[in-house]
Amino acid sequence: MDITHCIQAILSKAGNHIHGRDSEDSELTYSSIVEWKQVCGLLSVPPGGATVDDGNDENVNNKSKNELATQDENSQPKNINDVDNNNKSKRTGENNNVHDNNTTSSEPPNRKEWYQTGYEYWEDESNCPATVDGVLGGFASLSQHDLMGSKKFLMDLKSEIRPELKFGREENGGAMTRACECGAGIGRVTKGLLLPLGLSQCDLIEPSPRLLSSAPANLGDTYSSQCRFFCTGLQDFEPRPNTYDIIWIQWVIGYLTDDDLVEFLKRCALALKSGGGVVVIKDNTCEEEAFIVDRDDASVVRSLPYVLGLVELAGMRVVYQRFQEGFPESIFPVPIIALKPKT
């Protein structure tokens, strides 16, 4: 069974929502995950165009509408534009010289278009200036509160659940500690959370050359010298095994298809240092439906059970979880979830 049908079955069996809607058009709704993906071209339609019986008994109205940078352990890119030019096409799937483990002959017809739409949205400065306010969609006022909540989460995780988690060299026998910020933008989390915790090095992974090229200036000379910059989409990022103490994934999983998110988390599991390494997901979730689709930037907000179902399919388990506190009621609920491999 493919990922789409697996996650829908998991949600249905647990009595969770499987229906969803468009973020802007109130009349554009979907009775199931399968229907949404078929309509949007993110799932191959069965022969003859027949729809899949999803077993859904809810009455939901439906209006259908149809670089990998070379990751040498000691690499330190000096000219970020070189990285950008070599890897710009990774988000869009245009680089035919790069092997994509998730691309097969049965690839959904609109997968590349999905990533192309997101890439173009974030590359457009009118949508996202290369500032904290820009990358947070006009919510710069939340940044410090967000970073404080994230720091408390990691400190509590270390003290209560994962004492073997290492932040600085001194607690790691003098050896370097490493973090990875996924969907890094201009390095907001690296600057405000990861490096201040004492981590020796941080890798910034970001598909937008425009945003990533602004990261060194945002970080400043000292922090920038502790960073490496990789211009690639997460669907193509292949981290080295046994590399990271912390892989931080914030406000970006909605840009990955379910299949690509599961595969990405599998690669993250291998990239964690044995022992105390953790993957942390921090992202928006919805409560009244399984998903909310934003067609403008090709993203999806998933329910918490939906996210946790994909985590399960990736072979990972939750070791610590809480919700970000203090955000305005108009903001989606934002869980912070620490993960480790099941085995």
Image (spheres, rainbow, N blue to C red):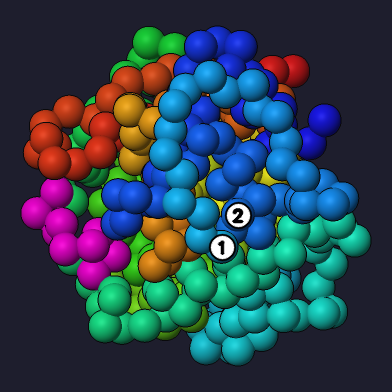
Which residue is at the front of the view, 133 or 152? 133
Residue 31: x and y in percent read 51, 35
Which residue is at the front of the view, 280 or 171? 280
The quadrant of the rendering that contains the N terminus is top right
Q: Can the viewer see residue 139 in this picture?
A: yes
The quadrant of the rendering that contains the C terminus is top right
Which residue is at the front of the view, 239 or 141? 141
Left or right side of 178 for 268: right
Amino acid carrying mark 2 in the image:
Val
Is 138 in the magenta?
Answer: yes
Question: Circle 2 — which element?
Answer: helix
Q: Is residue 66 above or below residue 13?
A: below
Left or right side of 96 for 94: left
Q: Is residue 24 above or below residue 32?
A: below
Identify the magenta region: 134-142
Q: Mark 1 points at which residue?
A: 66
Q: Going 61% across and 11% down the picture, which residue do you hit?
A: 13
- Mark earlier in primary sequence (2, 1): 2
Left or right side of 15 for 271: right
Which residue is at the front of the view, 331 or 337? 331
Q: Can the viewer see residue 181 in this picture?
A: no
Q: Going 90% across and 61% down the picture, which residue do you hit?
A: 105
Residue 199: x and y in percent read 43, 45
Q: Mark 2 points at which residue?
A: 39
Q: Going 55% across and 35% down the picture, which residue do you hit?
A: 32
Circle 2 Cα neighbour tier, 10 Å, few/some/many (<14 / 14–19 / ≥20):
some
Amino acid carrying mark 1 in the image:
Asn
Q: Quadrant of residue 42?
A: bottom right
Residue 216: x and y in percent read 37, 75
Q: In which quarter of the image is residue 315?
A: top right
Q: In which quarter of the image is residue 97?
A: bottom right
